[in-house]
Image (cartoon, rainbow, N blue to C red):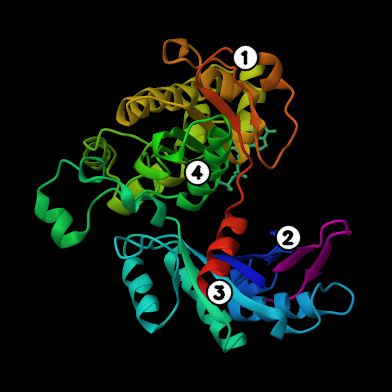
């Protein structure tokens, strides 16, 4: 089956077309700056593997117009990979927040749309954008099955002690204030790959204890026992946990009223500060991009050095904490932009964890081949495997969509 995967942000529409039987990607692309200044500067990048990337500049005032251009490009005689839209068997949509209602992918109907709308309270930047993509696809591809795959779904197996905050219980019951966790599709994908490798090494699924670290612009970790998430670092929103590109991660909640009283920040201003001006950017004062922060640190910038130390220290703390939550550890997995590409971060994050049976082999860590099934960078005489596994959220969405539809 041909599956179209759609991931809509507030001003972007990312897409990838898969042959779900062979799990091959036929084309991927991005419509960017959709709706900004009326969509006047919008641009579409369309990449067929093995061919030169195509770029189209065309006004895209909204996601419907962007999708029209994507569909036309997919079926175009020159740039296309299918001859007719009928060939698309299903569409899989990334949806950020599924709350407690969705623990797996679902076929989209009116009720599902209404629930995603309700969840927008908890993900105001993401769910409304995801819905724009869903509505545009329903209009343009009538009769084609539409599936929602939620970032929060994988973490719905967390037990209450992991998902409840120490707040009055009625805040959970009446307002849904609890830890939901995000990046679930990525944690699930890489933990599946790691799980297969552990099974080959004789550790059966029910016994497997894996910690996954998704380190990109947004960063989160998960503790995965027997294939299910039992804890994760992100919470009610994607602000909690690790240090990120621009997000602060774990924080004493008293800092928020303190910011108000001392600096006069309104709740909205405090929210903007914590989401957009903290993390690697805020500590280093240089950039939210790890490559820039590393370059500045190497040139002697003390703040940049501190940012990297905090970043790695938090990963290390959560490895320790999750090995306690899991009651042991078989594997640690690194994925996403930083996790897949930064040997220094991987090495520092696991420094001093020899007591847990974790040691990174510098030779393997520094000379990675990019393998879909991942690379083991641990010292072979240690009991805990350390894998670097390229994430593929789009493939996971395509797989879920094809399974559900067929
Ligand atoms: P997103 O969360 O937006 O999908 P990515 O997974 O692409 O983000 O990760 C972006 C991060 O990956 C940035 O901080 C970037 O600096 C980092 N990154 C990408 N390539 C490298 C590299 N070669 N070395 C270190 N960091 C890298």
Residue 244 percent across, percent down from the top left: 48, 37
Residue with the mark numbered 1: 300
The numbered dot on residue 406 is 3
Write down the quadrant of residue 143 in the picture. Answer: bottom right
Q: From which residue to which does the magenta span run?
A: 42-61
* Horizontal side, residue 260 vs residue 62: left or right: left
Q: Residue at x 63, y 15 (%)?
A: 361
The numbered dot on residue 113 is none
Residue with the mark numbered 4: 218
Task: Estimate how packed mark 2 is, as few (under 14), some (14 to 19) or many (20 or more) residues with alpha carbons within 10 Å.
Answer: some
Q: Residue at x 58, y 61 (%)?
A: 399
For the residues labelled 4 and 1, the Cα–Cα distance comes to 26 Å
Of badges 4 and 3, the one in the foreground is: 3
Residue with the mark numbered 2: 25
Q: Secondary structure at mark 1?
A: loop
**Who comes first in sequence, dot 4 or dot 2?**
2
Q: Tag count in the figure?
A: 4
The verdict on label 4 being within 8 Å of ligand 1 is yes
**Who comes first in sequence, dot 2 or dot 1?**
2
Task: Estimate how packed mark 4 is, as few (under 14), some (14 to 19) or many (20 or more) residues with alpha carbons within 10 Å.
Answer: many
The verdict on label 2 being within 8 Å of ligand 1 is no
For the residues labelled 4 and 2, the Cα–Cα distance comes to 25 Å
Residue 180 percent across, percent down from the top left: 32, 51
Task: Give the quadrant of the N terminus.
Answer: bottom right
Q: Residue at x 62, y 57 (%)?
A: 395
Write down the quadrant of residue 264 in the picture. Answer: top left
For the residues labelled 4 and 3, the Cα–Cα distance comes to 33 Å
């Amino acid at each position: 089956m041909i599956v179209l995967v759609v991931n809509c942000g507030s001003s972007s529409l990312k897409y990838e077309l898969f042959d779900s039987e062979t799990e091959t990607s036929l084309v991927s692309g991005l419509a960017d700056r959709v709706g900004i200044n009326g969509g006047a500067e919008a641009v579409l990048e369309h990449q067929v593997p093995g061919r030169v990337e195509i770029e189209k500049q065309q006004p895209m005032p909204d996601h419907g117009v962007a999708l029209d251009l994507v569909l036309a490009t997919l079926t175009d005689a020159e740039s296309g990979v299918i001859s007719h839209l009928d060939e698309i068997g299903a569409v899989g949509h990334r949806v950020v927040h599924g709350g407690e209602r969705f623990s797996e992918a679902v076929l989209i109907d009116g009720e599902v749309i209404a629930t995603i709308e309700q969840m927008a309270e908890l993900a105001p930047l993401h769910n409304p954008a995801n819905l724009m993509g869903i509505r545009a696809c329903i209009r343009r591809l009538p009769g084609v099955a539409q599936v929602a795959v939620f970032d929060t779904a994988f973490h719905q197996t967390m037990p209450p002690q992991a998902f409840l905050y120490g707040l009055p219980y009625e805040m959970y019951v009446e307002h849904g204030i609890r830890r939901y966790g995000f990046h679930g599709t990525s944690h699930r994908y890489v933990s599946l790959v790691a799980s297969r490798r552990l099974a080959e090494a004789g550790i059966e699924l029910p016994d497997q204890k894996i910690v996954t670290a998704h380190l990109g612009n947004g960063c989160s970790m998960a503790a995965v026992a027997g294939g299910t998430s039992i804890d994760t670092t992100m919470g009610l929103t994607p602000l909690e946990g690790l240090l990120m590109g621009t997000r602060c991660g774990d924080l004493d909640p008293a800092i928020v009223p303190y910011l108000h009283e001392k600096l006069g920040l309104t709740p909205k201003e405090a929210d903007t500060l914590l989401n957009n001006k903290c993390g690697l950017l805020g500590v280093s004062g240089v950039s939210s991009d790890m490559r820039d922060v590393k370059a500045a640190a190497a040139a002697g910038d003390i703040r940049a050095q501190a940012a990297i130390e905090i970043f790695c220290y938090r990963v290390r703390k959560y490895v320790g904490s999750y090995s306690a939550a899991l009651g042991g550890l078989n594997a640690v997995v690194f994925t996403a932009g930083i996790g897949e590409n930064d040997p220094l971060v991987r090495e520092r994050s696991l420094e001093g964890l020899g007591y847990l049976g974790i040691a990174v082999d510098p030779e393997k860590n520094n000379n990675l081949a990019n393998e879909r099934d991942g690379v083991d960078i641990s010292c072979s005489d240690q009991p805990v495997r350390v894998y670097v596994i390229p994430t593929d959220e789009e493939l996971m969405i395509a797989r879920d969509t094809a399974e559900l539809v067929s």
